[in-house]
Amino acid sequence: MSYLEQEIYEQPEILARLLSEEVENAARLAAAIRERGVQYVMVAGRGTSDNAGRYGKYLFAAMNRLPVAMATPSLFSIYGLPPRFGDALVLGISQSGQSPDIVSVLAEARRQGALTAAFTNEPDSPLAVAADHVLALHAGAERSVAATKTYTAQLAAVALVNALLSDDPALLAELQRVPEAARRTLELAPQVQRIAERYRFIDRCVVLGRGFNYANAYEVALKLKETNYIAAEPYSPADFIHGPLAMLDESYPVIVIAPAGALLDEVRSALALIRERGAELLVISDDAETLTQGRLALPLPVSLPEWLSPLITVIPGQLLALHLVLERGQDPDRPRGLHKVTLTR
């Protein structure tokens, strides 16, 4: 079994461990956010961690009315022109905690007196040292180049802090359902394998997700790019129909992440336009009517509240990337030109 496959299947256990062991650290961070009168959040991350920040962009705003900005690390590490942080929480998200540019964002924020936090799998890393508060991801050694288990752990850390900041016990109860939901979602593997057989020769696709699942459009596209070298383009359906729709034809696969929620009707409207173009739709959803819109469908076996759905809707995309690699006879753990830790300035 490849490292990639092992780590995909470790996710339920990791999520349960994080949600058990990081409550106190998350509570301390939530208390500091209140005490410091934080007015917005600045997130620094790269790749998969940047996609976790996209989830935070929706969740901090929707749940706690805190706007989120994504940092531009080169302003800190190369240009030497950092912005003023003011009353911000500056959050660094990184599996390794090693990238100098991400560390430089937190170091400058701390110098300015802003509240800083790190979500990392390495609690002794330079990023953790630069932070006032640290949430460990508890994912264990990550050997696969393509990150999977640390991504869902990062989402869980974001969700945990927001639930505690909201001071609503019901949200914490909902969050405790996630590990079992992830375990059941992994049972889709045989269906995903059949879809991978059909998609074995694709070299391009579109991945769509909106709202809380916008982050997963980017993350699933990234997994397909780095493991299978597919030109996978991520979009919100709202953006996609404003121009990129024109590139579709009958040979173009479109993967749609569409769990039940406030935006489902809007997503369905976009799907109708895509069907008119003749593109092949693969729909990932827990909504029966929405699933009928796809030529191919992956019915989620568990429904979670919309704000938590990204923690399981990404799993079919991870499985698809894995099974496509295996169908193509390639090594899941040795994508060309990539290394486990990428150090950027």
Image (cartoon, rainbow, N blue to C red):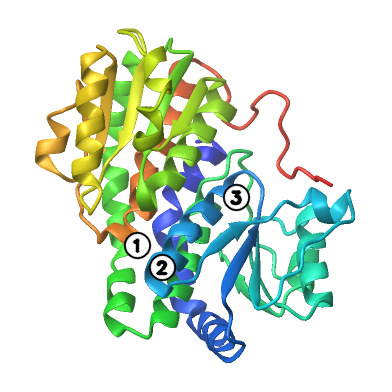
Q: Nearer the viewer, mark 3 or mark 1?
A: 3
Distance from Cα at disc 3 to Cα at disc 1: 23 Å
> 263 or 256: nearer the eye?
263
**Image quadrant in which you'd find residue 318:** top left
- The x and y percentages for residue 183 are 31, 54
Can you tell which mark lies on residue 179?
Answer: 1
Question: Residue type at mark 1?
Answer: Pro
Is the residue 82 above or below the residue 36 in the image? above
Is the residue 31 above or below the residue 265 in the image? below
Question: Residue type at mark 3?
Answer: Asp
Q: Residue at x 57, y 44 (%)?
A: 147
Q: Residue furthest bottom?
A: 35
- Secondary structure at numbered mark 3: helix
Q: Residue at x 50, y 36 (%)?
A: 1
Tell whether label 2 touches label 3 (CB within 8 Å): no
**Image quadrant in which you'd find residue 15:** bottom left
Residue linked to disc 2: 16
Image check: 201 left or right of 345? left
Can you tell which mark lies on residue 50?
Answer: 3
- Secondary structure at numbered mark 1: helix
> 108 or 155: nearer the eye?
108
The reply to whether residue 215 is in sight is yes
Tell whether label 1 touches label 2 (CB within 8 Å): yes
The reply to whether residue 140 is in sight is no
